[in-house]
Every structure is written in structure tokens, then in C-alpha cells.
């Protein structure tokens, strides 16, 4: 069986009906979810050399928490330990090694790296994307999602359970052709994380780089 860019095997002859059916199943599932948390493994492929990087970086691992509407907290394990936090309006990135905290405004259409952020932000798949099923087998369907309007990324990918709509992996391809893939494990739903999960307490002694400050200078 052939493999798609997300590492899934199966037929590429899946049809538009399956794509729409799977998108609706995913939508229905995530409309019922208030929050979720999971372990993740993240890998990035550079667009250089026809998508083949000169050296394959080691996957990054960690823990992520999402909550509606559009809140998230990514905790990356060492090496390259960092925390990425958003309350839906502001994004903070704490780089432990560099001792910096970067603050950014979250604009419409922004994604930090996982298509689940779109689903947990009350997004509508079939309204927002042109949807194709690029790979399918008896258990899973891989969807390719191309935004219908301008966005900060080129396309999204979702790998979902064919029956339940449960998303097991996502990908985001940026405007330069670089692809970030994330696989999820040990997903837990509706665990009611405390509100301070989605704010960042800035430690003493770090440099704050504020790109969200729009005050006149």
C-alpha cells in the first residue's frame, strides 16, 4: 500500500463523498468536546530539496491542552524545552534556553501548528476549506484541507478514525511549503482544565519581546 505525507497507508482513490462524510463526522465529534489534552510527537519537514531536509531533526515531544474557544497550552520537553500558551487573543512563547518570552496577537486565521486548534476554536470545516480525501483504508481517512480564504498557512491535514471522527494526527503546511506533523496519544476529553492553564506567568530574569504591543510610541 502507498503512504501519504502523514505516514498513513491505504488507497488514494477515496472519492469526494467520503471526504465530505468524514469532515462532517469530525465536525460533529469536536462540537461535543469542550476541552482535550494529549501527549504529542511533532516533526517538521523543510520545503528545501523537494521536501527532503538535508538532516532530519529529531521529533519534539510534549503535552498539549486545548479548550474552547481557541485556548491552548503546549509544553515541549527537553531538549529545546519551551511553553506555548494562548487565551485565544494573545500568544506567549517561553523559550527556556534563550530565557525569552515572546508575546504575539492572535489574528484571524492564525494557527500555531496543529489543525486541532481550528476545531477547538469553533471552526466549520466544510465552510472554511475545500476538502479532499487523499488516503483511506478500513480504519482511517486522511483529509487535505485548503483554505477558501487567505490564511497564515497553505493547507491543513487531518488523519481521523473512519467511524468515530476521532483525530489521531494533524499537519500544517505553511506558506513556504514547510510541513509540521503532529501525532497525538493518550487523548483525554472534557477534563475541565483550570483557567490559569491558558495564561503564562512570566518568570523573573527573562527578556520579554512584545510584538502585540500596539500602543503609539
Image (cartoon, rainbow, N blue to C red):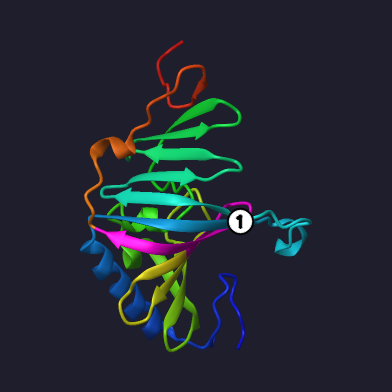
Residue 179 visible? The answer is no
Q: Residue at x 74, y 63 (%)?
A: 50
Q: Residues within 10 Å of mark 1 (few under 14, many from 20)?
A: few
Task: Say above or below: 141 vs 79.
Answer: below
Based on the displayed image, in which of its 4 quarters is residue 17 positioned?
bottom left
- Number of callouts: 1
Q: In x, y percent, where is residue 118? A: 37, 55
Q: In x, y percent, where is residue 32? A: 20, 63
Task: Say above or below: 99 vs 51.
Answer: above
Q: Residue at x 43, y 64 (%)?
A: 185
Q: Which residues are magenta?
A: 170-189
Q: In x, y percent, where is residue 1? A: 60, 88
Residue 40 visible? The answer is yes
Q: Residue at x 37, y 27 (%)?
A: 201
Based on the displayed image, in which of its 4 quarters is residue 203 positioned?
top left
Q: In x, y percent, where is residue 126? A: 34, 68
Q: Main secondary structure of the magenta part?
A: strand
Based on the displayed image, in which of its 4 quarters is residue 128 positioned?
bottom left
Q: Residue at x 60, y 41 (%)?
A: 80
Reply yes or no: does residue 179 show up in magenta. yes
Camera-nearest residue between 117 and 99 = 99
Classify residue 144 as left or right of residue 4.
left
Camera-nearest residue between 147 and 30 = 30
SS at badge 1: loop
Q: Residue furthest top?
A: 217
Classify residue 190 as left or right of residue 155.
left
Residue at which label 1 appears: 59
Camera-nearest residue between 10 and 122 = 10
Task: Say above or below: 200 vs 73.
Answer: above
Reply yes or no: does residue 180 show up in magenta. yes
Camera-nearest residue between 51 and 84 = 84
Amino acid at each position: 500500500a502507498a503512504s501519504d505525507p502523514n505516514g498513513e497507508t491505504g488507497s488514494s482513490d477515496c472519492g469526494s463523498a467520503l471526504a465530505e462524510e468524514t469532515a462532517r463526522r469530525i465536525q460533529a465529534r469536536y462540537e461535543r468536546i469542550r476541552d482535550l489534552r494529549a501527549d504529542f510527537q511533532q516533526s517538521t519537514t523543510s520545503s528545501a530539496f523537494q521536501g527532503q531536509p538535508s538532516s532530519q531533526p529529531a521529533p519534539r515531544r510534549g503535552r498539549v491542552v486545548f479548550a474552547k474557544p481557541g485556548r491552548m497550552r503546549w509544553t515541549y520537553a527537553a531538549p529545546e524545552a519551551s511553553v506555548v500558551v494562548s487565551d485565544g487573543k494573545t500568544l506567549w512563547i517561553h523559550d527556556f534556553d534563550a530565557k525569552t518570552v515572546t508575546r504575539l496577537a492572535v489574528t484571524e486565521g492564525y494557527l500555531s501548528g496543529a489543525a486541532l486548534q481550528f476545531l477547538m476554536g469553533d471552526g466549520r470545516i466544510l465552510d472554511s476549506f475545500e476538502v479532499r480525501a487523499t488516503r483511506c483504508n478500513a480504519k482511517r481517512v486522511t483529509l487535505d484541507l485548503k483554505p477558501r480564504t487567505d490564511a497564515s498557512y497553505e493547507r491543513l491535514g487531518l488523519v481521523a478514525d473512519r467511524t468515530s471522527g476521532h483525530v489521531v494526527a494533524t499537519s500544517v503546511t505553511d506558506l513556504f511549503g514547510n510541513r509540521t506533523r503532529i501525532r497525538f496519544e493518550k487523548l483525554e476529553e472534557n477534563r475541565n482544565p483550570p483557567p490559569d492553564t491558558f495564561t503564562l506567568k512570566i518568570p523573573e530574569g527573562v527578556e520579554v519581546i512584545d510584538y502585540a504591543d500596539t500602543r503609539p510610541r
